[in-house]
Amino acid sequence: MQTAIDALRARSEVTDRKVGVLGFCLGGKLAYLAACRTDADAVVGYYGVGIDAALDEADKIRCPLTLHIAERDGFCPPEARERIVATLKGRPGVSLYVYPGMDHAFARAGGEHFHKPSALMAHDRSIATLKGAIGPHYDLSALWDKHCEYEFGTRNVDDTMSTMVPEPYVNHIPTMTGGVGYRALHAFYTNHFVNSNPPDTTLTSISRTVGATQVVDELLFCFTHTTEIPWMLPGVAPTGRRVEVPLLAVIKFRGNKLYHEHIYWDQASVLVQVGLLDPKLLPVAGIETARKLLDEKLPSNTLLA
């Protein structure tokens, strides 16, 4: 493995001479050993088999190390897992993640024990480890701002798509609108989104969290319902009413391009504000949700008896 690392560093493509190690199953143990015995810049291991037999080398760990451990891994019984955690937990640069209820190979797509939520979480943690030590380090916040500028400012579909990977997807969770893949998403943006937002639409940032691969934006989405908005109020004729609703965007990147958007908002609050839902009949609120987001001193518990 050290020979492979040296060979990679000697190649012209590896401009910064940084190399990471990623291993699964037996490769997870080899990855751990690479952290102890090689000069790799970062190491990630998935459900390593036999790491507990090599814990006497833990003091030799030389680089950031992340280990993903399946709680119910038959190849790494509880006593072995406990020794690994007890020995490695708290060491500088070492991150241990135990995935509750998961079995061996939970990240192998199509496998018997594949569990997509755990695989996605592990992937994000793996990329964070590798990018932190190796890079590249993109300004994800600026990339997201440029995407929003094309969507809501210049309203240019092709420019918007240029900020995304070749096959992106968007999911507006409350209404399940969006698109998967370039053609479907381009059609959605063209016919139902970019040119369908009212002229006075505004996005006001409340907070932003930037991670290794994601941006999470807390926003206030405001508009006057003067045009039909197919992605938020499909089939609802313009009511002329003012709408202000908190909105949360979870934006995933691959490299310097957007991979997906998960967009959340309180659809009940929107329906109240356009007059389609009576707040007296259900425990829902209207524009008050947006107002309280900006002023936490406004009354709480107004829906309680």
Image: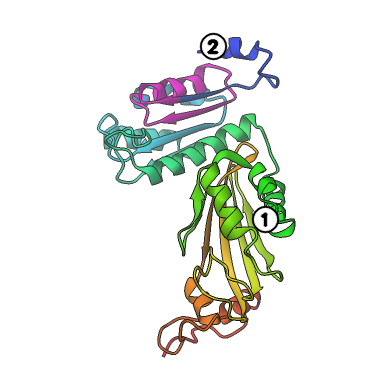
The stretch drawn in magenta includes residue 169: no
Is 22 drawn above or below residue 241 in the view shown?
A: above
Q: Is residue 91 visible?
A: no
What residue is shown at x 50% (from left), y 68% (from top)? 234
The stretch drawn in magenta includes residue 47: yes
Query: Which quarter shows the C terminus?
Result: bottom left
Mark 1 is on which residue type?
A: Glu
Asked whether 179 or 279 is in front, the reply is: 179
Q: Are marks 1 and 2 in contact (CB under 8 Å)?
A: no
What residue is shown at x 61% (from left), y 62% (from top)? 218
Secondary structure at badge 2 equals helix
Q: Which residue is mark 1?
A: 151
Is 200 drawn above or below residue 184 in the view shown?
A: below
Secondary structure at badge 1 equals helix
What residue is shown at x 38% (from left), y 43% (from top)? 116
Q: Residues within 10 Å of mark 2 (few under 14, many from 20)?
A: few
Q: Measure the C-alpha gap from mark 1 to mark 2.
A: 45 Å
Q: Is residue 182 visible?
A: yes
Where residue 124 appears, x then y in whole percent? 51, 41
Q: Which residue is mark 2?
A: 4
* Range of residues picked out in magenta: 23-50
Where residue 80 appears, x then y in whole percent? 31, 32
Asked whether 275 or 55 is in front, the reply is: 275
